[in-house]
Amino acid sequence: METYDVAVIGGGPGGYVAAIRAGQLGLKTACIERWPAASGSDVVYGGTCLNVGCIPSKALLESSHRFEEAAEEFAAHGVKVGGVKLDLATMQKRKDKIVGELTGGIRLLLKKNKVEPIAGTARLAKIGPQCEIEIGDRKIAATNVIIATGSVSRPIPAAPVDNKMIVDNIGALAFTEVPKRLCVIGAGVIGLELGSVWRRLGSEVVILEAMPEFLAATDSALAKAALREFTRQGLKISMGCKVDQAQVAGKKVKVSWSDGGKQHSDSFDRLIVAVGRIACTEGLGATEAGLKIDAAGRIEVDEHCRTAHANVYAIGDVVRGPMLAHKAEEEGVMVAELIAGQKPEVEYDCIPWVIYTHPEIAWVGRTEAQLKEAGVAYRAGSFPFIANGRAKGIGDTVGMVKILAEKESDRVVGVHMLGGNASDMIAEAVLAMEFGASAEDIARTCHAHPTLSEAVKEAALAVDGRAIHS
């Protein structure tokens, strides 16, 4: 039986990054993955994020945004384009090509770092000083195990997914034609992004959200501004909706729901179910092996991602915390370095969130509501992109930057952005918070002119009531 220093179960962002880092540190490492390749003869790495999540959705978001710009916005720049036509097949081929290149790249990185890829579904057969893992008819041993099995779409009984008429994220990324009328259950990250893609390409999109507040986890001012903008763009978003039933009838999906005591029913060409994700431990044998599972189905771990067994770790979507690829990657690096005897930490308060709509929504740290609930005295400063010269030149002035700082120390505890390129600009805020920067530190930092990032500097100045351009 082959023995490894580290066996990683799962080859998504958390798993393959953990395996690569372990390999870099000189540990004999295997990475077990079961995601089937399109050929059916092998597996591919990258997990949900790379294969049917982050990467393909962003490819379609970019393509659909360019299509809408060419059709509706170029004329304002003096660029006249007549008869813009959609070639959805080419758009989908471009998306698939990007995914293929990146999954192939992971294979090369694993080989470069001497990580052995193993295809199949892993089951924990024994946990002890030497753990044993079964992969089909094969059995391996490992001194340390990292579980990185990710998550799957949360099902709802009212709308069973067939990935033909009623689809999850996988089916929603593979439409071969643009639905005339599209219903989305869930106004979270996935629902808003996929709804945006198909609206831009010509769908009438109706989004039904169960929660009474739109994007309750974000800053309330930004959430309200985002809702106004998405509504102006044409997304029809209804809050407080309970979906009672979704039935396929011929080439239509009939959806019945209620809100505020009123009953509704309508027919759509497709239905996307995007009500969140749940931890995936299918086939792992976690409970039988003695791992503790919480009420949400996640593997219980400590602050260093250790399970109840000192040499068994779990990371990413299968444990507590946000289901974000970059969070999983940070945990993967941390665990690999812990196994190697180093002392890394992950600062969970400094993990950024992004919704890749247009405008983008990005934030890190706490909201005003959270600070108030915790009794933390703070000061807030904000700056609108409509007063930013670069945003004016681009023609994209929706949104703002808001910075929250502790009143006594001026330490930045939250940064919230709504606007173009917010996903990139949030990195400055994350770095500032990682280093314990004050709002004054950001305000005193020279930002190039004209750039969108000047809005961050101005928001920091506004914390002290001295923004220059507003």
Image (cartoon, grey):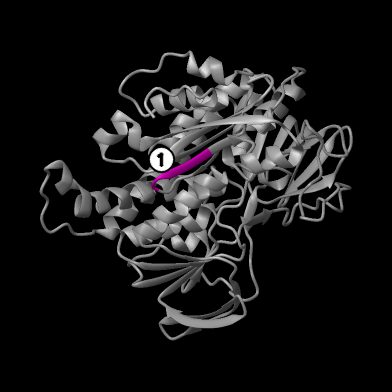
Residue 18's place in the image compared with 215, above or below, is above
Q: Is residue 198 magenta?
A: no
Residue at the farthest front position: 465
User: Which residue shows up at 37% across the image and 29% down it?
Assistant: 452
Q: Does residue 453 appear left or right of residue 371 in this picture?
A: left
User: Which quarter of the picture shows residue 302?
Assistant: top right
Q: Is residue 360 magenta?
A: yes
The quarter of the image holding the C terminus is top left
User: Which residue shows up at 86% across the image and 32% down it?
Assistant: 310
Does the image show residue 113? yes
User: Closer to the camera, 469 or 94?
Assistant: 469
Q: Does residue 211 appear left or right of residue 313 in this picture?
A: left
Which secondary structure lies at badge 1?
strand
Main secondary-structure element of the magenta-colored stretch: strand
Residue 206 position in % (x across, y down)? 44, 69
Residue 9 position in % (x across, y down)? 69, 42
State which region is magenta: 358-362
Query: In the rendered image, which residue does mark 1 sit on?
Result: 419
Residue 149's place in the image compared with 18, above or below, is below
Residue 342 position in % (x across, y down)? 74, 17
